[in-house]
Amino acid sequence: FKDKENYSILTYEETLEQRISSLIGTFTDALIISSRNVRSVQELQKERQKHLTKAHEYHENNIVLLYNFTKRQVHGQKFNPKWTGLFWIEKKLGNKVYLIRDKIDNTLPDPVYVE
């Protein structure tokens, strides 16, 4: 260095303080950015979930298939059908609850809950 007197000599503690404060500033900025990103992704996920969980509204004499939940986690049978049917909506019992009948007009004894 040509002009040594223009440079101030910092102690170890002062240098450490400066470095820590710059790191804290960097981490604070990163925390703010990441919290914004998390919030926006959570909002997107809520919107997607809202569309996915919307149950279908069926009317009498609509044709439907029944999903067999017992075959959902069975491995080695991925080519076996998981849906049974055709069934017709016989009557709406309540919100998302239906009575269904098969093609020879036999009404199934248990009502079906639609998700």
Image (cartoon, rainbow, N blue to C red):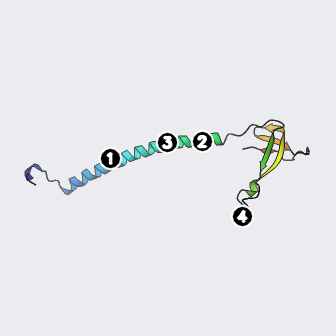
Q: Residue at x 74, y 57 (%)?
A: 71
Viewer-nearest of labels 2 and 1? 2
Question: Residue 25: which disc?
Answer: 1
Which mark sits nearer the N-terminus, 1 or 3? 1
Q: Residue at x 43, y 46 (%)?
A: 34
Q: Are marks 4 and 3 in contact (CB under 8 Å)?
A: no
Which mark sits nearer the N-terminus, 2 or 3? 3
Amino acid type at circle 2 is Arg
* Mark-to-mark CA distance, 1 and 4: 54 Å
Amino acid type at circle 3 is Arg
Question: Residue 39: which disc?
Answer: 3
Q: Residues within 10 Å of mark 4 (few under 14, many from 20)?
A: few
> Where in the figure is residue 14, as x and y percent of width and height?
21, 52
Viewer-nearest of labels 1 and 4? 4
Q: Residue at x 50, y 41 (%)?
A: 40
* Mark-to-mark CA distance, 2 and 4: 31 Å
Q: Residues within 10 Å of mark 2 (few under 14, many from 20)?
A: few
Amino acid type at circle 1 is Gly
Quadrant position of the C terminus in the picture = top right
Viewer-nearest of labels 2 and 3? 2
Query: Residue 36 falls in which quadrant of the image?
Result: top left
Residue matched to label 2: 48
SS at circle 3: helix
* Mark-to-mark CA distance, 4 and 3: 40 Å
Q: Are marks 2 and 3 in contact (CB under 8 Å)?
A: no
SS at circle 2: helix
> Where in the figure is residue 54, as x and y percent of width and height?
68, 39
